[in-house]
Structure formats: structure tokens, C-alpha cells
Amino acid sequence: MGALYAMIGIGLTIVFGVMRIINLAHGEMVMLGMFGAFWSQKLWGFDPFLSILIWAPVMFLLGVLVYRFLLRKIIPGGELNTLLYTAGFSLLVANLALMLWTGDYRTISLDYAITPMRPMGIAVPAALAIGFGIAVVVTVTLWLFLGRTDIGRAIRATSQSREAAVLMGIDVERVAALSFGLGTALAGAAGVLLAPSLYLYPTVGELVIVKSFVIVVLGGLGSVPGAIAGGVLLGLVESLGAVYVSTTYKDGLGYVIFLLVLLYRPSGLFGVGKS
Amino acid sequence: MRRRGAAAAWIAAGVLLAGLPLVVHNSFLLHVCILIFMWTVLGEAWNVLGGYAGQVSFGHAAFFGLGSYVTIILYLKGGVAPWWGIPLGGLAAAAFSVPIGLIAFRLRGPYFSLATLAVAELAKLVALNWEWATNGPTGFLITTLPPLHLFGVTVNWESKAPFYFVAFALMTLSMAAVALLARSRLGAFLVAIRENEEAAEAVGIDTVRAKVLTLALSGFLAGTGGGFYAFYFRYVDPDAVLNLGISMEMVFIAMVGGLGTVAGPLIGAVFLTTVGEAVRERFQVGHLIFYGLFMMLVIRFLPEGIWGRVRKMSARIGAREVRHGAPGG
């Protein structure tokens, strides 16, 4: 789960870093990705894992459009307004999905992923293992993209200091639209990869958004390596907690660590930002 | 003059509203009114902290849920009638809020919001898994309410009217409490904290104390709202009273009405409850679509809230009167 959590976390943290907004609709983007994978398999017979090639660009486009037409005018209104606006948006998307697809729990079954893989004697569900593999590839690619390309550098520069980025001739507006698209695409892609391993239902976003906050804060809001570390850490804590503490409280364990980190290292374990 | 006139108008409207069930017997209308009153209490609860003190909480469902659980458990296991249980639920939520406040107020801005979110999620997990106290996911159901005789009349719990009066009283008290707070020293401290916390501290305000006190009041109001919920709906389970949606709805109501105003939550509750109930009739599943849409439209076009805009406009008219030499003020 760790790498998938990391992908969702990176999406959220990039958006926060560049625009200083916490996108409460991020979980819904994951949900849309999950349903995308479901429908493309059901209707057109696409392999859910390969459908990432369709859904990631589609979600990117959706993100850019949402930014251009819905979010851009709101951001100058302040943090609270933007936060609530995205909360309203998340309600809208989740309930549209509920109306279109009903609240049924669905699953994706894959013929080749029934028998679990057994690396080093530990049984791992094959669907999760494949998802993990792709997520690692995506994360590494993204890392290279942010570090080595001009656009990636522009995104990082803007999140470090918006004013300085403007002075260096970066088109901050374009960077904002791009990074919102990128964040959305990452969430959608993570949703696609998660779809074969989880139950799908329209309000799954609520669960995802809380977890992604935990991830992002663990690593420090706005920090990409932090989000990766936070994602891996939360995945580890949850699976170890399920084994050694109890399955019912494994989610609770994540929140407790989250609160502790908030209290003692509010800038995150790998913090770059200020509290 | 102007001020006294406004006060008289409020009181007249209040008296008229209080007598409504004596004239109107349409139970759907009364139900909508009860919901509006309940949400006003909850909106006020959030608004004290979020609107006046500027501390945005995403976890008020924890206080709401605690209040509703205390009320229902006291009644079902201890035989304490709900009308005592409601204030006790509020007190329990207020007591719970103090340690939460002492911990969470070490954080600022979005970090505080996220911490409250985590607190509420933890509360939900506890309610789901602590079967001994909370009955786990099944929750509690009240089948019969205790008989009550008031002024020689036996109260009919099957009608809406008694609930209407209780909800109305709770709303009036909560609005009065917030109005008093807003005019008190503490109210001024809170606005100072909202505008600039460092400066407030520098002039000698004990900001942590002020915030913890406010959170206790806020928790108390949310807890009584929760207690009323248990009393009216007679059903409490973790998904109903402890979900993120409850916390968000409190924020929405305060926001749509107008942050940091006494009447704002009432206006917000009127709008959002009516929008919610009106579309619920027609759309079984998707009524929250319109809720979300309405939210987005308000923030886009009325960022200061409906009541905030009304106040601003009336202030402008007042200013014009003064400029023209009319006897205003």
C-alpha cells in the first residue's frame, strides 16, 4: 500500500506547495480513477492496470479544467474559502457518482491475479503487488520530472517562493494549472491502481482524503520526499499494526502517530515548511 | 433608535416563531423548522470558535457525537430523562473539549484543522469498536420516551410540537450565549486572536486560555445539539453522528450565513436545510449534489455569507443617511 499512498500524498502535497490550498476533493479524484478503471474494464474490456494510460491524462485534463474554471477565482478569497469550496466540490462529485453509479460495493476481478505472489515466503495479493510496482515506477518518473525538467523545476521554485518565481520569469498561473492537473492525475492514477485491490463505492473518497492528510502531514506539508516517506510509513504502520496490535485499531494507530507528529514536529518528519 | 428597533423586531419574530406549533399542524413544516433550529445551534457552536476566534475545526462531529451518545446512554442505561440528558451531554462534550483544546491549540492554521479532523476520526473508531459502552456499529435506539406531564397536560411524543419547543429554546439560548460572548471581554480577545495572534499575545492576552474557554463553550453547544439529535431522532450510531459530513455541515452553515455574526448560523441553517429538504423530496440519492453546488456558488459570489452581506449593505445605507444629515444611529 505504501507506494500507492505515496502517490496520493504527492498529488496533495504538490497542490498545497504551489497554491497553498488543501484540496478536500482529492479523495474524490482517487474515487474517479477507481471507477474509471472499473468501467473501462466492464465496458471495453481494458485491463485495469493498462487503463492508467487513458485515465491519467484524462484526469490531468480534468484537473486543469477544474482549476481554470472553478478554482482560480476563489483562491484570492483566502485559505478558508478555498478549503470550503473544495469541500463543496467534493460533495458534488461524490454525490453525482452516487446518483450515476448507486452506492453498491463493486469489485474488479482479474483472472491472472487470483493466486497471491510469494516473495520471500510472505503472501502478497498479486493485484496489490502489480499496483505497487507501477506506483514505484510512476513515483520515480515523477521524481525525475520534478528534478530534471524545466517545468518540474518551475513547480518546485513556485512552491518555495511564489514571488521569487514570478521575478525569475515563471508563468505562475500556468504552473498552478499544471500542478493542479498533475496532482489530480496522480490521484486518479493511484485510484486506477487501487481499484483491483479495494471495494469501489462512490464515497470511498472520504476514507482516502483523511488518510492522505495523515501521509502529507507525516512527511511535512508541501514536501515531495516527505509525502513519499509518509506514504510508505503509513502503509508499514497499518500492516504491522494489523498483525501485531489489532486489525480493528490499525486505522487508529495511523491517527495516533499523526497527532503525535503534529504535536511534536508540526513541520513533519522531513519538514521543510514552517508550522 | 435603530438598534432598539432591531432588537424589538428580533423579539417579535421570536415570539411569533415560538407560537408556531399552536397554529400550524403540518408535521413536515414543523420537522423542517426543528431541523433548522438544531442546525442553528450547531452552526453557532462552530461559529464561536471558527467565526469569532478564527480557529477552523473539522472535528466538531466529535462533540456532537459525544453529546448524543451521553444523552442516549444515560437514558437507556441510567434512566435519566433526555431533557436532563441534553445539558449533561453538553457538559460532557465541554469537559472533553478541554484536554483536546490544550493539545490541539498548540497548533495553528491548517495544522489545527487537521488535528481536529484526526480527533473526530479517532472518536468514530472508538465508538465503532468499544462495544461495551457504545454498542459498536449497531448503535442505540430509543423505543419509547418517558411520560411527562406539564401544566396538567400529558406531552404527546408522537407529535412534533414538543420537540419544536425544545429545539426553539435551545436555539434561543445558544444565540443569546453567543451574543453575550461577542460583547464580552473574551469576545474582543477572540477577534484580536483571529486578526493577529502574535499581536494579541503581545498585548497580554492569554490566548491559550481564551481559546480553550471558547472551545469549551463551542463543545457545550455542539454537545447539546447532539443530545437533541438523539432525543428527536431516537437513534444514534457512529455513522450517523460521528461522520465527517456532520463536521463539514456545521462549517457550511456558519459560512453560508456569515462568519463571526450571531444571526449568521440561523440564516445559513434556513437556507441549507430548505435547499436540502426541498431537493431530498425529488432526488432520493443525489440531494447532496445541490448542497455542494449551493456551497460553491455562495463562496464564489457571497464570500462574506448571506447575513454578512446584508449587514454590510445596511451599514452602507446607514452611513448614507448620516451623510445626508438624517437623524440616524
Image (cartoon, rainbow, N blue to C red):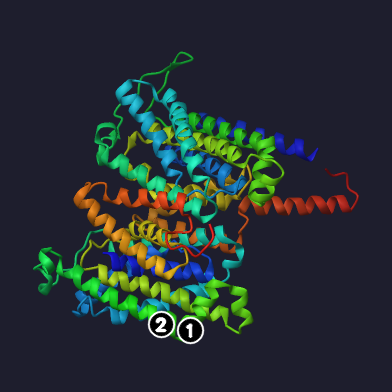
Residue A261, percent from left and from top: 42, 53
The quadrant where residue B183 appears: top right
Residue B146 seen in this snapshot: yes
**Seen in the image, is A184 located left or right of residue B2?**
left
Residue B25 seen in this snapshot: no
Residue A94, disc: none
Residue A43, percent from left and from top: 21, 77
Between residue A248 and residue A68, name the one nearer to us: A248
Between residue B275 and residue B197, name the one nearer to us: B197
Which chain hosts label 1?
A: A
Between residue B23 and residue B132, name the one nearer to us: B132
Tell which residue pokes out farthest to the top in this image. B152
> Residue type at mark 2?
Phe
Circle 1: element type: helix
> Residue type at mark 1?
Ile
Residue B87, percent from left and from top: 47, 27
Image quarter where the N terminus of chain A lies is bottom left
- Say whether disc 1 or disc 2 marks the residue closer to the N-terminus: 2
Question: Are the residues flagged by discs 1 and 2 in contact, CB closer than 8 Å?
Answer: yes
- Residue behind mark 2: A145
Residue A232, percent from left and from top: 31, 64
**Seen in the image, is B295 located left or right of residue A249?**
right
Circle 2: element type: helix
Residue in the picture at 47% in, 70% down: A15
Which chain hosts label 2?
A: A
Residue in the picture at 39% in, 31% down: B231
Query: Do pointers 1 and 2 mark residues of a single chain?
Result: yes
- Residue behind mark 1: A151
Q: Is residue B41 above or below residue A20?
A: above
Residue in the picture at 66% in, 51% down: B196
